[in-house]
Amino acid sequence: MSGKGAPELSVRNCGDLRVAVIAAQWHEKVMDGLVDGALRALHELGIDEPTLLRVPGSFELPVVAKVLAGRGYDAIVALGVVIRGGTPHFEYVCQGVTQGLTQVSIDTGVPIGFGVLTCDTEEQALDRAGIEGSREDKGHEAVTAAVATATTLRSVSEP
Ligand code: DLZ
């Protein structure tokens, strides 16, 4: 199951990479699907002992990503679900987590798979959670993208 428009990435020789998955806890059913998809993708890639850490909400993902990026991980995968409510909080959480993860990745040079769903409804999120009936599997996609990027970076030798 690959998302509409998402490339079929071929990633090889990555079983020795150190990968951490950080998962928020809001919207449990969707999160369970994202975490399962991420762990399945890692297993398919031969990465069988990833670190899995939970944080309260998506807003807490960047700080943990930053600390892990400084501890030798080759790739990090951030998973979360933010669903629009009746207040501007949605925009602030989405902006904080997106900008935070982007900044951490660029500042540290560690690729971060962006598996944070930002949806108007729970139905939209479930459709992307990689569970039965979903059309997309964003946890799986985020792992593949992060690991593919880490292998690309590893292939570029230092001058
Ligand atoms: C506060 C909040 C709200 C309203 N909605 C979500 C959400 O849909 N998804 C999510 O992951 N987290 C949400 N949070 C919690 C914030 O991410 C954060 O954990 C709190 O503001 C505490 O810092």
Image (spheres, rainbow, N blue to C red):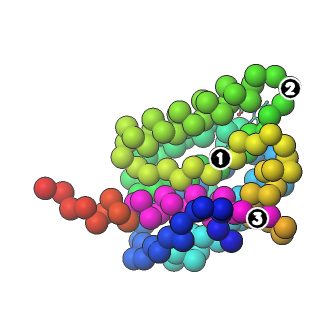
4 vs 156, left or right, is right
**Label 3 amino acid?**
Arg
In the image, 95 versus 49, the foreground residue is 95
Gap between marks 2 and 3, in whole Å? 27 Å
Q: Which residue is mark 2?
A: 86
| Quarter of the image where the C terminus is located | bottom left
Query: In the rendering, at what x and y percent does residue 37 appear?
Result: 68, 65
Q: Are marks 1 and 2 in contact (CB under 8 Å)?
A: no
N-term mark: 3 or 1: 1
Between circles 1 and 2, the one closer to the viewer is 2
In the image, 61 versus 133, the foreground residue is 133
Q: Which residue is mark 1?
A: 116
- Quarter holding ligand 1: top right
Magenta segment, which residues? 134-150
Quarter of the image where one finds residue 62:
top right
In the image, 38 versus 130, the foreground residue is 130
19 vs 37, left or right, is left
Q: Residue at x 53, y 53 (%)?
A: 113
Visible residue check, residue 116:
yes
Quarter of the image where one finds residue 103:
top left
Q: Which residue is mark 3?
A: 135
